[in-house]
Image: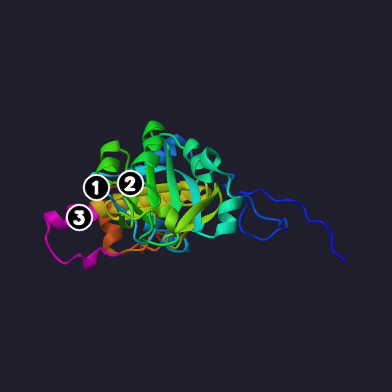
Amino acid sequence: MFRALAPVSRCAPLLGRRLLATAPAASTNKISDELLEKLGGLSTQALVDGLWVMGWPCSQITGSRPLHPSHKTVGRAVTLRFVPVRPDIAMDKPPAGESPEYEAFELCGPNDVLVMSSVGPWESVGGDIKFLRLMQRKIGGLVTDGSVRDTDEIINYGFPTFCHSTTAKQGPAAMQPWEAQGVISCGGVVVRPGDAIIGDQDGVVVVPAAKAETVYNIAHGREVIEDIVKEELTANPGPPGKFYPFMSGKIKHESPLAKLLATKGITPENSNQFEGTADW
């Protein structure tokens, strides 16, 4: 005997016509504006290293590159997921201005980065007319593992854009926006709404909101040490192997690096970079 099933939202994930228990999409930890600014002051390399020593999976969005050499971004993730074109799904998607695409746009502001999960690296997630609205919203940045079109206009809009490439193709021929503010995979990396997104000339890194403070402390400590090492090697040229590479939380107390750091006031008593001091 068949029974009626509860209706689902037309914007719900493609999980069939029944309701499933799911974890909340957005993290319960909101990153403060102050912490966002501090994260944006670090290199993406230091952030990747910070997550790596914590045992987290790769956090760099594969293939997403700055559209212009001047582009750098930092902000909280607003997410948008595309799915391949299929006629019945197209009929179920809310029309026109109610599309999940524009729902996501209206959630964006100066401290937000719109992260758009494409169905392929060469498919267009949008161009000048759609992204005019993002300029009007004064968005902090746009990141996608797909491509964008109308490149000159987007650069002129002034907001940082990171993408796989550029294209002249129309996006709706291959995919359609389906869900705003869900957990997505972008360039092989999981992104939750509210995660910190940091982009520079080396690419884009996702820092989980729940671990953002810890990642900052590790990454900042690493950058301080790397600056000291570079200063020493500049003053006394030689192979860097005496001091580098090093692993945060693993610097041996009597190592040449530890002795160098001690001359700068960095010791196991005030740093989490040494053996036995890791606080993550």
Residue receiving disc 2: 161
The answer to whether 79 is drawn above or below residue 59 in the figure is above
Check residue 260 in the rendering and tell me which mark sits there, or answer none: none
The earlier-in-sequence mark between 1 and 2 is 1
Q: Main secondary structure of the magenta part?
A: helix
The kind of residue tagged 3 is Lys
Q: Which residue is mark 1?
A: 68
- The percent coordinates of residue 177 (x first, y second) are 50, 51
Magenta span contains residue 5: no
The residue located at (20%, 55%) in the rendering is 230
For marks 1 and 3, the one nearer the N-term is: 1
- Asked if disc 1 and disc 2 are in contact, CB closer than 8 Å, the reply is yes
Quadrant location of the N terminus?
bottom right
Given the image, on which type of amino acid does mark 2 rest? Thr
* Most foreground residue, 197 or 137: 137
Check disc 2: other Cα within 10 Å, few if <14, some if 14-19, many if 20+.
Answer: many
Name the spot of residue 274 as percent of width and height, x first.
39, 59
Residue position for label 3: 230
Residue 271, given in percent of the width and then of the height, sits at: 39, 51
Residue 231 drawn in magenta: yes
Using the rendered view, name the quadrant where residue 89 is placed: bottom right
Q: Position of residue 264 (x, y in %)?
A: 26, 48
